[in-house]
Image (cartoon, rainbow, N blue to C red):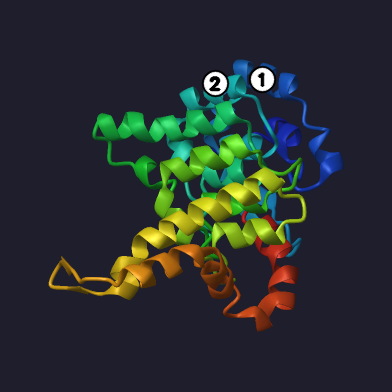
Amino acid sequence: MEPDQNLFQLIHFRPWDREERNQFDEAAVLQYISQHPQSVLALYEFKTGSGRGATKNYCLHRIIALGASLALIQKVHAIHPIAMTYRTPDFGSTSLHAACMYAASLDVLEYILKQSTRDRDNKKDDGNDNMIRQTTKHVFLPLHLACQADIPHAMPLAQIQLLVEAYPAGLLRKNKLWDTPWKTAQRNKSSHPEVLDYLERKTAQLQLQQQPQEYGGEEEGKHQPRDVSTTLTTATTSSEFLFSLSNKYEFHVSIQSLLHFYIGIVHL
């Protein structure tokens, strides 16, 4: 399927550029797709954030990144279902990564995640149930990207909670910068205080749950006895422990801060 240049002109805007985002005309896209539904089936070539290359992606991913409404996303998805789980060959981004990178609305995130549940129940082996666990080339989970988002705004708490509840173990996953989602949110100057508090608390709780296995010792599947005073001390210092752990490679901080923006925008 050859790209439709008329549709391309309606969706080629760079989602990380605030001025270009404002040029995205959803009504015009909806009208064109209604008249030319086959146009969404083609792969389109978009410039990457680095400006030194291009990536091929479907219309669905691009309109999600540009902040399309749930109604438009549902229409495009109905025409081209497989685009939802498509991963770009160069960066490994999915539609969920796009939604998280650009702070999609709660209903859009719920819809994308719901496809995972529906297809798993229908026993369709198309990878949908793995989207929440899939990482980009730079080992960014959707949750990492949600914590990094600042265009058009930082991700609200409700969306962060939805992602954490969908994949709690993701709180302890680290990207190529050795950052957990909480650390990623700390680096984001736009992060909401309530998001930082929530991530710190949930990360500490999860780390504390895993400490008996990691630090108390398990032998042949059996829990080893732990000293009560040690457990209490560990509990009261869990936040300090996590903070020191996340800063284990603090000598990389200046480089990481500079790379965070670059790594984020090249995904799409």
**Label 1 with label 2: CB-CB less than 8 Å:** yes
* Pick the front one: 236 or 238: 236
Q: Residue at x 42, y 30 (%)?
A: 114
Q: Residue at x 57, y 42 (%)?
A: 160
Amino acid type at mark 2: Lys
* Pick the front one: 249 or 131: 249
- The number of discs equals 2
Residue 34 lies in quadrant: top right
Amino acid type at mark 1: Leu
Residue 5 lies in quadrant: top right
* Residue 112 spot, x, y in % from top left: 48, 33
Q: Residue at x 81, y 46 (%)?
A: 17
Task: Tell me which numbered mark, 1 or 2, is placed earlier along the sequence.
Answer: 1
Q: Residue furthest bottom?
A: 251
What SS does tag 1 mark? helix
Residue that carries the numbered disc 1 in the rendered image: 30
Residue that carries the numbered disc 2 in the rendered image: 75
* Residue 74 spot, x, y in % from top left: 53, 23
Say above or below: 89 vs 69: below
* Pick the front one: 16 or 117: 117
